[in-house]
Amino acid sequence: MGTDTKSDKPESRGPQLKLSRTKRFLFTLVVFLVFLLVLEVALRVFGIPRTISDLREDPGLVQRTGNGLGYSYRPGWSGYHAGGMVRINSFGWRGKEFSVEKPFGTIRILGVGDSFTFGRAVDDEDIFLAKLEAMLNSDGGARYEAINSGHENINTVKELRYFKEKDMLKLRPDVLVLGFTVHNDAQAVKNRTLYRRYRRMASLPLRMSESERFKNIAESVRLARILRAGIEWAYHDELTEVYYRIVLSNYEDGSRSWKACREALIGFQEICLANRIPLIVALFPVYTRELDQTYKDYPEDFRRVHDKLKSVFDGREGVTVIDMLDTLADSGLTINEIRVPIDGHPNRVWHEIVARKLYETIRGMGLKPVAVE
């Protein structure tokens, strides 16, 4: 019989390092933090931007001033802003140069509004006011000139204040186009109480990412910015619901925001009527809940907001309200097809649709050049 050479003795092993549960946790934490540090350094070395908006952003566009907005665009500046090619004229507004005195035989259109009117995230020639001018002039006959005074991060109350401060009537506009963005143009005061209430009710990751401390960290730490974007994506539905509730609160009867917004809208109408300037108010709807939806799926609560805005001008002369909700719904396009993926503002397709609607409206007015007195 053969002899079994396999030994029953356990294999000899070297000395083993035994760590307590606390030490293992600390060791793992240190390794993880070192990994994050190396990853952050790599992101900086390879030029990954701190924020998404830094992808195509040249410095120097904005300068702090003492005007009613608290800032202005630097005259003569040109470069990329939020991915779009921007040129600021000597008047401090976006677009080509123009003279204060209206050229003879010209029908002048003045656009007032926020970032949607300014045309954030699209090139100069793709903004709806620039497209509108090109469409009207392609017909021959009278010469049209569209001037864009749009500014980012403002609401209707500030727009009216800025309109008066800059004495825009001296430009002798033949038509005033007021762009009204439903999601923020009624927010005359920040509803901090409502925001804090919803934040307390939100999921833990959202409460963390929406805290001021985390936002400040994300301003300088790229990993934190990526984490925040990931949380916003994962909790999109919850964020959208909070966002909708806050926006709708601005239109509640008795709220300071709605009162101030309504007064500003009437203020524009009264100024235009007194100076015999036709006023066109273009309502720009909020996005639907899902980005693959069309505007046929627009929330009923916001449809009522549109009706409320239009009712402000009931019985008032000299104003035409065009609701872009209907036009965008008829297009059949999804939200993804009319917005800039990274920035979230409307893209050139959206601006084309708005320009076409304004073209039809202005053409139907039968305007003629008014001689300058």
Image (tube, rainbow, N blue to C red):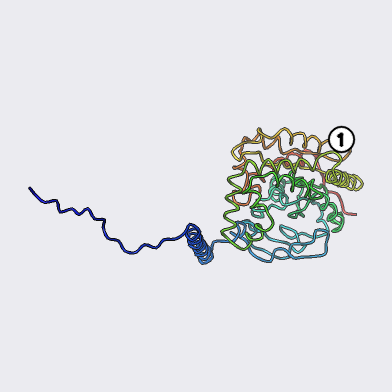
Total numbered labels placed on residues in the image? 1
- Helix, strand or loop at label 1? It is loop
Question: Depth check: 222 or 123 in front?
Answer: 222
- Residue on which disc 1 sits: 314
Residue placed at 72% from the left, 57% from the top? 94
Q: Is residue 203 above or below residue 217?
A: above
Q: Quadrant of the C terminus?
A: bottom right
Furthest residue toward right: 274
Q: Nearer the viewer, residue 76 or 65?
A: 65
Outermost residue on the left side: it is 1
> Residue 171, percent across and down?
84, 56
Side of 211 where 231 appears, left or right? left
Q: Amino acid at mark 1?
A: Asp
Crowd band around label 1 with a 10 angstrom C-alpha radius: few (<14), some (14–19), many (20+) = few
Q: Position of residue 217 (x, y in %)?
A: 63, 61
* The image quarter in which residue 315 lies: top right
* Residue drawn at x 30%, y 61% as measured from the top left: 13
> Residue 267 location in percent, x, y?
88, 47
Q: Nearer the viewer, residue 270 or 144?
A: 270
Q: Is residue 158 above or below residue 367?
A: below
Residue at 63%, 36% (x, y): give it: 294
Task: List x then y, in percent, for residue 113.
Answer: 77, 50
| Residue 103 occupies quadrant | bottom right
